[in-house]
């Protein structure tokens, strides 16, 4: 059995129920035999054609909403990368035998994404179950009760659909408020000492898992030194934004009085133990001494910073890696490491949304980051930040938020 290749085209055609594949432009890429049979269409009438050219709304029904509801569901799948089960839909279909006549039909659709290796949605699976016979049972002694059942089910389905829409709108409002709060709490682009730093924050697209990532840049006391840090809070929305703000502020304050990044993360870890929602939060912080040309760093479960040397060599700062903030028993100190750099080097800190992809080993994401940094290393920090985001984030946006800090040393 293991030596036999699976005929996925045959499997697709044999799937029970109506299943079609749509491109992101809503053009039919394929449809199984059951879909064509129950829809009353030939393959030539469907494959390669725009969805709503094949199945438009009934022009004789001013209240028809099938196109609008289906388009909204497919757009949600494209934006979120998540499966979307629609409420029961009335979606009339023009008769193939009697053009101009429309048949009253009821459907229960489910739409789901198909991803490529980079996590981009490349196809949409459109599965439909026809329930017309259930809803429209006519004739015979039970006809009256059937029509009552039809009306009741259709009404409840419309109510469920309206409730789902209100929930989506409420989630959208929460997302907007959380993003506004995130923007207010994160420091703006700025000059740190005499060094230029580019900062970026990109929220997840079309999803609530936003506002847990953060960054900070702090001028340290004594000499020409700064602290650069990034972190990631597990969670989303307003709660994550609130926890993010607390942890960022606490690390900023601790860095001003700590002897080094290890001590600053020790303080932050003790603080995280008493902050609800800070469980499994990660952070990495670096102390840069421009007079001595040294970087001292410590990490609490976070992806390693990258030091791009002027000649293009990459050094992942991974010699002081430790568990997340609330996972280390007190008072065991966190590890700390140092490295030197030459003038013109570049330090890059980021969160996992930049490098992680569904079903892919993290080393592949780190390799992509190193390649992009190497090719664009001579650009100024602002241009470098834009190039890295453009090349590493999926074209339609990432499913996790991303923070990025680039400092030219």
Image (cartoon, helix red, strand yellow):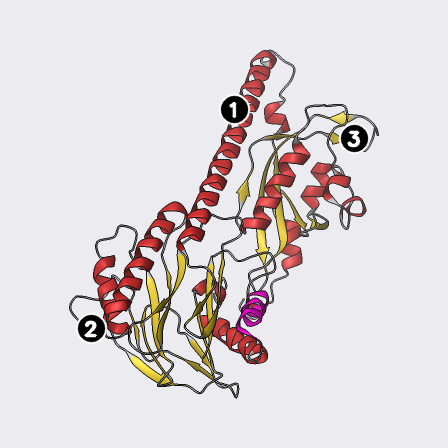
Q: Is residue 409 left or right of residue 259?
A: right
- Report whether 3 appears left or right of 343: right
Residue bearing mark 1: 156
Which quarter of the rendering shows the C terminus?
Answer: bottom left
Q: Callout 3: few (<14), some (14-19), or many (20+) C-alpha neighbours within 10 Å?
A: some
- Tell whether 121 sits left or right of 210: right
Q: Secondary structure at mark 2?
A: loop
Nearer-the-camera pick, 226 or 54: 226
Q: Residue at x 54, y 43 (%)?
A: 84
Q: Give SS at disc 1.
A: helix
Residue 177 among magenta residues:
no
Identify the mark nearer the N-term, 2 or 1: 1
**Which of the 4 image quarters holds residue 130?**
top right
Q: Main secondary structure of the magenta part?
A: helix
Residue that appears at 62% across and 50% down? 124
Q: Which residue is mark 2?
A: 333
Q: How far across and down, in percent of the image, does residue 168 sit?
A: 50, 38
* Label 3 sits on residue: 95
Q: Is residue 390 magenta?
A: yes
Q: Which one is in front in this view, the residue at disc 1 or the one at disc 3?
A: 1
Give residue 372's position: percent from left, percent from top.
56, 75
> Residue at coordinates 68% horizontally, 42% vertically from top-left?
35
Q: What is the span of residues highlighted in magenta in the rendered image?
A: 380-391
Q: Nearer the viewer, mark 2 or mark 1?
A: 2
Name which quarter of the figure residue 9 lies in.
bottom right
């Amino acid at each position: 059995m293991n030596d036999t290749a699976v005929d996925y085209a045959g499997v697709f055609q044999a799937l029970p129920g109506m299943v079609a594949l749509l491109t992101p432009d809503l053009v039919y890429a394929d449809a199984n035999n059951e879909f064509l049979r129950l829809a009353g269409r030939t393959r030539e009438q469907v494959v390669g054609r725009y969805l709503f050219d094949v199945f438009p709304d009934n022009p004789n029904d001013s209240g028809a909403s099938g196109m609008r509801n289906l388009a909204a569901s497919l757009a949600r799948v494209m934006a979120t990368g998540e499966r979307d089960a629609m409420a029961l839909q009335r979606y009339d279909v023009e008769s193939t035998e009697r053009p101009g006549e429309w048949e009253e039909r009821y459907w229960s659709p489910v739409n789901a994404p198909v991803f490529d290796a980079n996590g981009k949605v490349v196809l949409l699976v459109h599965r439909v179950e026809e329930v017309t016979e259930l809803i429209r049972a006519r004739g015979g002694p039970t006809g009256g009760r059937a029509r009552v059942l039809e009306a009741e089910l259709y009404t409840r389905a419309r109510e469920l659909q309206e409730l789902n829409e209100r929930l989506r709108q409420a989630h959208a409002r929460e997302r907007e408020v959380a993003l506004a709060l995130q923007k207010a709490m994160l420091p703006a682009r700025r000059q740190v000492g005499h060094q230029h730093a580019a900062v970026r924050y990109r929220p997840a697209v079309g999803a609530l898992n936003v506002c847990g990532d953060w960054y900070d840049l702090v001028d340290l006391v004594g000499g020409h030194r700064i602290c650069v840090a990034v972190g990631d809070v597990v969670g989303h929305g307003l709660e994550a934004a609130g926890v993010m703000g607390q942890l960022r502020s606490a690390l900023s304050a601790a860095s001003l009085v700590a002897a080094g990044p290890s001590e600053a993360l020790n303080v932050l870890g003790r603080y995280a133990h008493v902050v609800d929602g800070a469980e499994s939060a990660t952070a990495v912080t670096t102390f840069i001494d421009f007079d001595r040309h040294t970087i001292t760093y410590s990490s609490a479960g976070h992806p390693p910073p990258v030091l791009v040397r002027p000649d293009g060599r990459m050094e992942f700062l991974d010699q002081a890696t430790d568990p997340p903030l609330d996972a280390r028993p007190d008072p065991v100190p966190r590890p700390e490491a140092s490295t030197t750099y030459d003038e013109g080097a570049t330090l890059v800190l980021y969160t996992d949304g930049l490098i992680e992809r569904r079903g892919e080993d993290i080393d592949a994401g780190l390799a992509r980051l190193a390649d992009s940094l190497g090719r664009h290393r001579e650009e100024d920090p602002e241009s470098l930040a834009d190039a890295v985001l453009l090349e590493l984030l999926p074209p339609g946006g990432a499913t996790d938020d991303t923070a990025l800090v680039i400092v030219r040393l």
